[in-house]
Image (cartoon, grey):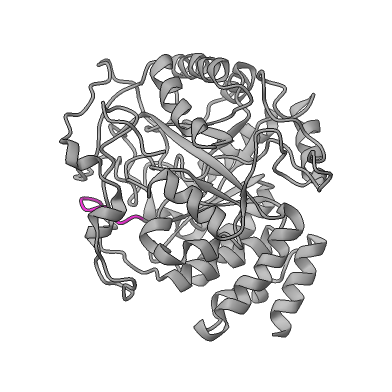
């Protein structure tokens, strides 16, 4: 296809496709799907080789959020039966992070529900970052705490944070239909605050909320304009008890086309397959690794992912390799910019962070800018007084999500598939071991 040849050439030059070209990717047929994946794969391999970066989520505070984001199981008024607890102690969060690092995660993403942090919350998270870096040498830490006030990004940077995540989620024109309690401009402002403070900016989207192709292209072009180092692509998990519970609009083929479009528009950034990959890509997940260079290991904030070992097996079986802690992520030209922005090099804020510049094997390396996707799809929350209370969970609830759903491989658009959504009952905030 002339379209795909043109997009590959532009991706290798880091040239922005036209809007018409981006829309044409989303409009390709299933007959052309493997060609689309192969073309996006050429761009992915040019900038990231066959490396896959692993990221691990730690939900510092679950539920109890005053925001009304329609997609979020932690939203105000949500009837979803998720875990609810207030702040984990630093040592508890560090122990949770260690499980992910032991499974190969290079970055730990610390997430807290709510509109945004108080200064006391920022100090608390700073102590958690210190505890994690003390116990896990070389780990990167991304904070995801919602809307930031002036000076808070700088405090997180000084505490050792390497990155900050805050997703745009959808286009500016449709944002008001998804959330009423804050604006699209609020989200853009927080990403800009993180960037200005020298943090690696991580910002992405949620697909499957009923948006149009034009909306998807709009938000991805906005992410490129914001110059995010990392773009997490979330696929809506339609939780029962939320306004979007019936929005089952995605097929595996649609998800692959969306990922390819993101790769062509953002050729040299870390594209992460984030929340919902198991629900919507299902058996097509290995194909997605030819487009994206990053995934989350194990469980998500309030839902269960596939077992961590299954992730590792999938990566190896597909012919990819896990990116090591000593290897930089972003291509050198982006790492240099990130280093200059940080004022002394990526990861200079905390001990043991990854080094910028070429990879040890001589390939085009990358900086610590990767960011945490899937975190903070909802803006994080106001503090409550109670201490975390582990949920009482039956042992059988710890079974991986894959075992809980003997479902057909393909769902028709709009078909409700609640059996594919497994609420998290293990890991942070519980007495059950995580599945990392």
Q: Position of residue 149 (x, y in %)?
A: 53, 26
Q: So how many labels did they put on this image?
A: 0
* Residue 107 appears left or right of 19: left
Q: Quadrant of residue 25?
A: bottom right
Residue 75 x, y percent position in the rendering: 30, 41
Q: Nearer the viewer, residue 339 or 364?
A: 364
Q: Note whether 66 is above or below 257 in the view shown.
A: above
Magenta-colored segment: predominant secondary structure: loop
Residue 284 at x, y percent in the picture: 46, 67
Does residue 50 appear left or right of residue 413 in this picture?
A: right
Res 120 visible: yes
Look at the image and give the residue range highlighted in magenta: 237-242
Q: Is residue 49 left or right of residue 428?
A: right
Question: Where on the picture, by quarter, is residue 36?
Answer: bottom right
Q: Depth check: give the residue in front, 203 or 196.
A: 203
- Rendered image quadrant of residue 355: top right
Q: Does residue 215 sit above or below 276 in this rendering?
A: below
**Up-down: is 320 above or below 11?**
above
| Residue visible at 79% across and 38% down in the picture | 360
Residue displayed at 24% across by 67% down? 416
Residue drawn at (56%, 81%), measured in percent from left and top?
A: 28
Report whether 241 appears left or right of 61.
left
For the question of whether residue 147 can be seen, the reply is: no
For the C terminus, the image quarter is: top left
Q: Does 100 lie within the magenta span?
A: no
Q: Is 428 located above or below residue 379 in the figure? A: above
Please state, as top left, top right, bottom left or bottom right, where the N terminus lies in the image. Answer: bottom right
């Amino acid at each position: 296809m002339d379209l795909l040849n043109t997009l590959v050439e532009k991706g290798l030059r880091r040239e922005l496709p036209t809007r018409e070209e981006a829309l044409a990717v989303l409009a390709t047929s299933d007959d052309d799907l493997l060609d689309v994946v192969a073309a996006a794969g050429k761009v992915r391999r040019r900038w990231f080789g066959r490396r896959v970066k692993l990221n691990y989520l730690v939900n510092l505070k679950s539920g109890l959020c005053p925001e009304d984001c329609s997609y979020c199981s932690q939203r105000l008024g949500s009837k979803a039966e998720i875990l609810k607890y207030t702040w984990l102690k630093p040592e508890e969060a560090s122990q949770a992070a260690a499980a992910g690092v032991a499974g190969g995660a290079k970055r730990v993403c610390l997430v807290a529900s709510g509109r945004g942090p108080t200064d006391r919350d920022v100090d608390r998270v700073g102590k958690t970052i210190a505890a994690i870096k003390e116990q896990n040498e070389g780990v990167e830490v991304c904070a995801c705490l919602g809307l930031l006030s002036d000076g808070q990004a700088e405090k997180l940077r000084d505490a050792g944070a390497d990155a900050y995540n805050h997703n745009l989620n959808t286009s500016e024109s449709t944002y008001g239909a998804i959330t009423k309690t804050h604006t699209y401009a609020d989200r853009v402002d927080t990403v800009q605050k993180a960037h200005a403070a020298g943090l690696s900016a991580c910002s992405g989207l949620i697909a499957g909320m009923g948006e149009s192709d034009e909306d998807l292209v709009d938000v991805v072009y906005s992410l490129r304009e914001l110059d995010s180092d990392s773009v997490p692509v979330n696929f809506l998990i339609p939780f029962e008890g939320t306004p979007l519970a019936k929005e089952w609009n995605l097929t595996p083929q649609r998800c692959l086309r969306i990922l390819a479009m993101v790769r062509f528009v953002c050729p040299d950034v870390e594209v992460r397959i984030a929340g919902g990959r198991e629900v919507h890509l299902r058996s097509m997940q290995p194909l997605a690794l030819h487009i994206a260079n990053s995934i989350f290991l194990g469980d998500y904030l309030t839902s269960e992912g596939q077992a961590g070992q299954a992730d590792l097996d999938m990566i190896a079986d597909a012919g990819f390799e896990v990116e090591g802690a000593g290897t930089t992520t972003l291509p050198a030209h982006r790492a240099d910019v990130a280093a200059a922005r940080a004022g002394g090099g990526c990861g200079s804020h905390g001990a043991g962070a990854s080094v910028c510049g070429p990879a040890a094997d001589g390939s085009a390396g990358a900086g610590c800018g990767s960011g945490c996707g899937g975190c903070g799809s909802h803006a994080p929350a106001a503090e409550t007084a109670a201490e975390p209370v582990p949920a009482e969970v039956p042992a059988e609830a710890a079974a991986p999500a894959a075992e809980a759903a003997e479902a057909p491989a393909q769902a028709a658009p709009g078909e409700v598939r609640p059996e594919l959504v497994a609420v998290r009952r293990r890991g942070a905030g519980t007495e059950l071991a995580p599945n990392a």
